[in-house]
Amino acid sequence: MTDYVVEGKGLTQDYYVSGGMFGKAKTVRAVKGIDFAVERGKTLAIVGESGSGKSTLARIVALIDHQSGGTLTIEGHEVDIARHKPDHVLRSKVQMVFQNPYGSLNPRQKVGDVLTEPLLLNTKLSARERREKAEAMLVKVGLGAEHYNRYPHMFSGGQRQRIAIARALMLNPTLLVLDEPVSALDLSVQAQVLNLLADLQDEFSLTYVFISHDLSVVRYIADDVLVMNKGECVEQASRDEIFSAPKHPYTQMLFAATPVTDVEAIRARVAHRKALRAGAGA
Ligand SMILES: Nc1ncnc2c1ncn2[C@@H]1O[C@H](COP(=O)(O)OP(=O)(O)OP(=O)(O)O)[C@@H](O)[C@H]1O
């Protein structure tokens, strides 16, 4: 049986929009019956133009918002956060990384506090154990234990996103929802952070739901791709299928409008990852 970490069936999200003083209130359906499933250790990329509903879907999968309709299943258990608040076990399994590393870290909190806070709230680890785990995680994401006592403003954008990733990993999640995690970064830094995410995925068998409007990024990171337009899924296929022969006219238009750069580098990296996986499985 396929080991799906997350499955959505008919996921729908309605927003109630007030009409102002004289207008009529209305309901906007931002996500319209989306089905998907992501296997353990794989990445589903969700692509689409601005306003297509990507972030709305991401917030449902990350257990931040409850869907108006459909079902969400995580690790085989149907989740209904409207009726049952997720317990800390479920909460720790699903973590989100946001686009803006400047906004997502509290400027008054030292990095060490950012990283140990989830442990303080959700585990019985001692202060010393929490610190050791945080320092080890800093090293894991390419920073150093010496960064523990520094403040977020002392880091570059890429380093802050590494801190946000480290924080997301502190409770050993199985699923990361990444909403445009590299789009606020310079191109060279984007590549470094994508490499880090790929390495962490291999090391911890992480499952990613990766929101992006950037097809170069998607080609690099995704195993499967779901294309959204106006809240609907217009096409869903493996990365290779969708990049070599997009079927839906909207996907064709999207791909034609946004040239994919640096294809050779991406292919080399993908081949390298496949070889690593094959070696690990041998
Ligand atoms: N809280 C809200 N209240 C009302 N409408 C909303 C709300 N959040 C999103 N929407 C609407 O839902 C639709 C989908 O928005 P969403 O942010 O999910 O799209 P997106 O694909 O992530 O876009 P972007 O890439 O610009 O973030 C849009 O029409 C948006 O205006």
Image (tube, helix red, strand yellow):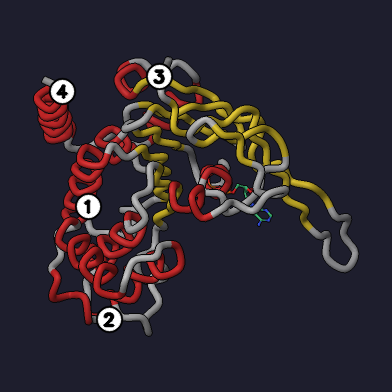
Q: Mark 3 vs ligand 1: CB under 8 Å? A: no
SS state under label 3 = loop
SS state under label 2 = loop
Cα distance between the residues tagged 1 and 3:
27 Å
Q: Which residue is mark 3?
A: 246
Viewer-closest of 85 and 250: 85
Cα distance between the residues tagged 4 and 2:
40 Å
Question: Residue 76 placed where, x, y %?
Answer: 52, 30
Which of marks 3 and 4 precedes in the sequence? 3
Cα distance between the residues tagged 4 and 3:
31 Å
Q: Which mark is residue 157?
A: none
Q: Which residue is mark 1?
A: 193
* Mark 4 crowdedness (10 Å alpha carbons): few <14, some 14-19, many ≥20: few
Tell me the residue at 40%/42% (across/down): 175
In the rendered image, the residue lying farthest to the bottom is: 108
* Mark 3 crowdedness (10 Å alpha carbons): few <14, some 14-19, many ≥20: some
Q: Which mark is residue 151?
A: 2
Q: Are marks 4 and 3 in contact (CB under 8 Å)?
A: no
User: Can you tell which of label 4 and label 3 is closer to the viewer?
Assistant: 4
Cα distance between the residues tagged 1 and 2:
20 Å
203 lies above or below 88: above
136 lies above or below 238: below
Three-letter code, disc 1: Val
* Mark 2 crowdedness (10 Å alpha carbons): few <14, some 14-19, many ≥20: some
Cα distance between the residues tagged 4 and 1:
25 Å
Which of marks 2 and 4 precedes in the sequence? 2
Three-letter code, disc 4: Gly
SS state under label 1 = helix
Position of 80 compared to 200: left or right? right
* Mark 1 crowdedness (10 Å alpha carbons): few <14, some 14-19, many ≥20: many
Which of marks 3 and 1 precedes in the sequence? 1
Q: Which residue is mark 4?
A: 281
